[in-house]
Image (cartoon, rainbow, N blue to C red):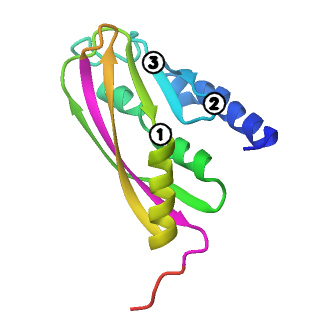
Amino acid sequence: MDKKQNRKFKRLIRFINWYPPFLFSGIRVVDYAEDFSRFRTRLKLTWYNRNLVGTAFGGSLYSMCDPFFMFIILIQLGEEYIVWDKHACIEFVKPGKGTVYAEFQLSPEQIADVKMTVDKEGKAVFEFACEVVDADKNIVAKVSKGVYVRRKDFVKPNG
């Protein structure tokens, strides 16, 4: 990744903290790897992201997890690939009663596997999981994301 691309992605991360769905939900990117292979987000429980029973609104818990596996793959693979979120599932394990965190990381081996599979097959959907945890590392929610990856030059076979 060249310096220009690196600056572009750093601007994206700064922007996402000001993105209204994150800003008004109390969600922030609080840490990330210099090569953008890892992100950590935080959701502070406030009056505007509490549900009717006083715990973290489930939509905010999911939102803090939404784009990051897609971002990692998009950044790591580069412009020769199309990357989209395909599906997601969230399991609420316990109420989020305070500040919660989620971390998203893909190893170089995982990225290489994605690239190899897509280069061979043209496209594929990959499953990634993360957990939302409280300050004591208790699991609040489990999230599973399906990310669609396709080579831009992939031609769909007829038939």
Q: CA distance from mark 2 to mark 1?
A: 20 Å
- Separation of marks 3 and 1 at Cα, in angstroms: 22 Å
Residue 152 magenta-highlighted: yes
Check disc 2 and report its element: helix, strand or loop: helix
Q: Quadrant of the C terminus?
A: bottom left
Residue drawn 40% across the image and 24% down it: 102
Above or below — where is 126 with respect to 60?
Answer: below
Q: Which residue is mark 1?
A: 107
Outermost residue, left direction?
Answer: 93
CA gap, disc 3 and disc 2: 14 Å
The answer, for residue 67, to whether it is visible in the render is no
Residue 133 in the image, given as x and y percentages of width and height: 31, 19
Secondary structure beneath disc 1? loop
Q: Earlier in the sequence, mark 2 or mark 1?
A: 2
Q: Are marks 2 and 1 in contact (CB under 8 Å)?
A: no
**Residue, x 18% and y 25% (percent of image)?**
93
Question: Disc 3 marks which residue?
Answer: 42
Q: Which residues are magenta?
A: 139-154
* Relative depth, front residue between 95 and 145: 145
- In the rendered structure, which amino acid carries the disc numbered 1? Ser
Q: Is residue 127 left or right of residue 107?
A: left
Question: Could you say which is closer to the camera, residue 16 or residue 6?
Answer: 6
Q: Amino acid at mark 2?
A: Ile
Q: Amino acid at mark 3?
A: Arg
Task: Name the element at disc 3.
Answer: strand
Q: Position of residue 73 (x, y in %)?
A: 53, 48
Give the mark toward the camera: 2 or 1. 1
Q: Is residue 52 left or right of residue 43?
A: left
Residue 13's label in the rendered image is 2
